Image: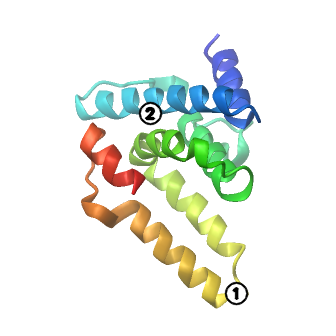
Amino acid sequence: MFTSLMGTLEFGLKHEDVEVAGESLSAAGAIGSFQHHSLVDGRPGLGVHNAPDASREGGCGILAHLMRTVLRRMIFEDASMDLVDAAADALLPLMLVERTAFEGVAGELLATLEGDAGARNHVVGALRELTAGNGLTDRVDRANKRRFRR
């Protein structure tokens, strides 16, 4: 049942209807927040439901897969301004619990810019600002979400 639910969530994240995508981003953010708070409190969170899965791109867990899906949509596909805040609210907790996966996605993005030093430097700066700018902390709270959106 969990796999079916996550498949539906992924479908919603990719949906062209802004309302469907926005609600799906909200759900992805809630799952990421749940995982983050669970780990901070010493609980397993999603546990085995977030285990690496060879059927997913990169063999990653579901949270890393959802983060990759959101990043891919916002960077390479539909960067609708209506979805930017919802995407930021989803990405912050997902990035905090899936740091290694985020670094992998960032590395893949940079690899696509191998021949363009100017673009590569710009993206490196943007990624640095995204992960460490504006006084960002390791918390998933309203203030940190606000800083992350900037």
- Point out which mark residue 32 bears: 2
- Residue 42 visible? The answer is yes
Q: Earlier in the sequence, mark 1 or mark 2?
A: 2
Tell me the crowding category of disc 2: few under 14, some 14 to 19, or many 20 or more residues within 10 angstroms, Cα based: many
Classify residue 20 by image quadrant: top right
The residue positioned farthest toward the top in the image shown: 1
Q: Nearer the viewer, residue 83 or 8?
A: 83
Look at the numbered disc 2 and give the secondary structure of its residue.
helix
Quadrant showing the N terminus: top right
Query: Residue at left 74%, top 52%?
Result: 77
Quadrant showing the C terminus: bottom left
Q: Nearer the viewer, residue 45 or 84?
A: 84
Q: Position of residue 55 (x, y in %)?
A: 74, 36
Look at the numbered disc 1 and give the secondary structure of its residue.
loop
User: What's under tag 1, amino acid-wise?
Assistant: Asp
Q: Position of residue 122 (x, y in %)?
A: 55, 80
- Residue 60 visible? The answer is no
Q: Position of residue 66 (x, y in %)?
A: 60, 38
Residue to which mark 1 is pinned: 116
User: What's under tag 2, amino acid-wise?
Assistant: Gly
Image check: 135 left or right of 54? left
The residue positioned farthest toward the front in the image shown: 82
